[in-house]
Amino acid sequence: KKILSKLNLSVSEGKKAFALLIDPDKVQNLQELQRVIHTAIECKVDFFMVGGSLILSDFLGPCISHIKALTEIPVVLFPGNNQYIDLQADAIFYLSLISGRNPDLLIGQHVLSAPILKRSQMEVWPTGYMLIDGGNKTSVSYMSNTTPIPKDKYDIAMSTAIAGELLGQQLIYMDAGSGADQMISERMIASVKRAIDIPLIIGGGINNVQKAKSAWKSGADVIVVGNAIEKDPELLIEITEAKTLLNQQLNVH
Ligand code: 1GP
């Protein structure tokens, strides 16, 4: 587990990380995709994530091969279900939707994909995935057929994250859903971060540099940005500068 242990090491040093999420369905054309990938490489994003809750296009494979052809930066699958697995990726978020009570997303999809993953070279990242209400109904809350944790139920979020950790998950990913109106609140991030000893990933609705900073400062180890960068690739540079500055201030660059 080379990539995950590297991430764990940098998180244990207090270093903040930044992942760029590419949704294959939102790729307008290959030039646009390449432009974003090039900027992400220049910015040295910590890893790429590719996936989504529903993928209609044939772009999943090409997205990954384009990235892999240009850089060694790891590509991590973020699959909505067992069909969105592409063995070119370096790692996969093996997501258990622990905020929900849908057995298919707690074990069903895993049973279907386990033999393929076991045979593959891919690193499997056991991840407790928690949906938090972000104000609007996002694709993931509809597609997963689960109710997100209310945004001010800190105790529920905290207990859920602890349960995930005790069950052996190696990461906790709290997500307000792609394109969420509101990102997860600072208080929610801080209370979950205090409760666990594994890395905390925060995503959903981070659409400017202030929000990125506030997520990191409240306790996110990794932030994930998708939508906003698809709309404005320049934001990649701004968020990277903020990350570098923060890591300098934390003396972990
Ligand atoms: C969604 O956390 C990711 O699962 C990223 O969300 O697209 O809103 O940045 P955005």
Image: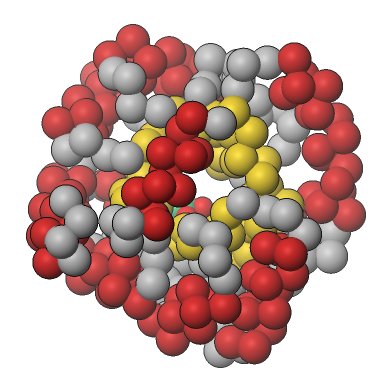
Image quadrant where one finds the N terminus: top right
Residue 239: tell me if it is visible: yes
Q: Position of residue 27 (x, y in %)?
A: 38, 30
| Residue pictured at 62% horizontal, 66% vertical | 131
Q: Position of residue 190 (x, y in %)?
A: 44, 80
- The image quadrant where one finds ligand 1 is bottom left
Above-or-below relation of 61 to 47: above
Q: How many marks?
A: 0
Residue 186 lies left or right of residue 251; in this view the side is right
| Residue pictured at 39% horizontal, 81% vertical | 186
Q: Which residue is more in the foreground, 26 or 164?
A: 164
| Residue pictured at 24% horizontal, 68% vertical | 213
Residue 14 lies left or right of residue 246; in this view the side is right
Q: Which residue is more in the foreground, 226 or 88?
A: 88
Q: Position of residue 133 (x, y in %)?
A: 58, 75
* Quadrant of the image occupied by residue 58: top right
Above-or-below relation of 205 to 41: below
* Quadrant of the image occupied by residue 69: top left
Above-or-below relation of 213 to 24: below
